[in-house]
Image (tube, rainbow, N blue to C red):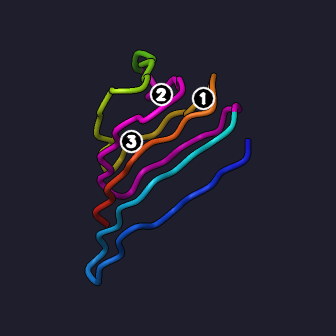
Amino acid sequence: PKFRTWNVEERDGGLYAGIWESTPGKWRIVYDEWEFCHVLSGVSVISEDGGEARTVRAGDSFVLRPGFKGTWEVLETTRKEYVIKL
């Protein structure tokens, strides 16, 4: 997959906000931070190890917490707004 990121805001203390986009593909994710996501376009499937897969589409919002381990699969090019707290 090809990724593009536009950081709109970066603050000392580990707060980041912006827009992220990915073309189709699948990869492993491991989170050490909190991330709030709001999907602007596309379709992705997020699967937590040992858990259920969740399909997210335009209009959906969700939070990934520290300790989350699993996979992210982009089925249709996906663009999201995000806020990350380290």
SS class, disc 2: strand
Q: Which residues are magenta?
A: 24-50
Q: Quadrant of the N terminus?
A: top right
| Observer-nearest of 54 and 60 | 60
Rendered residue at 57%/46% (across/down): 21
**Residue bearing mark 1:** 73
Compare marks 1 and 2 and give the one earlier in the sequence: 2
**Residue bearing mark 2:** 46
**Residue bearing mark 3:** 68
Q: Dots 1 and 2: beta carbons under 8 Å?
A: yes
Relative to 49, 3 lies left or right: right
Q: Looking at numbered disc 1 in the image, what kind of residue is underneath it?
A: Glu
- In the rendered structure, does residue 34 fall within the stretch colored magenta? yes
Q: Quadrant of the C terminus?
A: bottom left
User: Which x, y percent locates residue 14?
Assistant: 31, 74
SS class, disc 1: strand
Q: Looking at numbered disc 2 in the image, what kind of residue is underneath it?
A: Ile
SS class, disc 3: loop
Q: CA distance from mark 1 to mark 2?
A: 6 Å
Compare marks 2 and 3 and give the one earlier in the sequence: 2
* Residue 37 vertical position relative to residue 75 in the rendered view, above or below: below
* Residue 50 vertical position relative to residue 41 in the rendered view, above or below: above
Foreground mark, 2 or 3, reads 2
What main secondary structure does the magenta stretch of the protein show?
strand
Q: Quadrant of residue 25?
A: top right
Q: CA distance from mark 1 to mark 3?
A: 15 Å
- In the rendered structure, does residue 21 fall within the stretch colored magenta? no
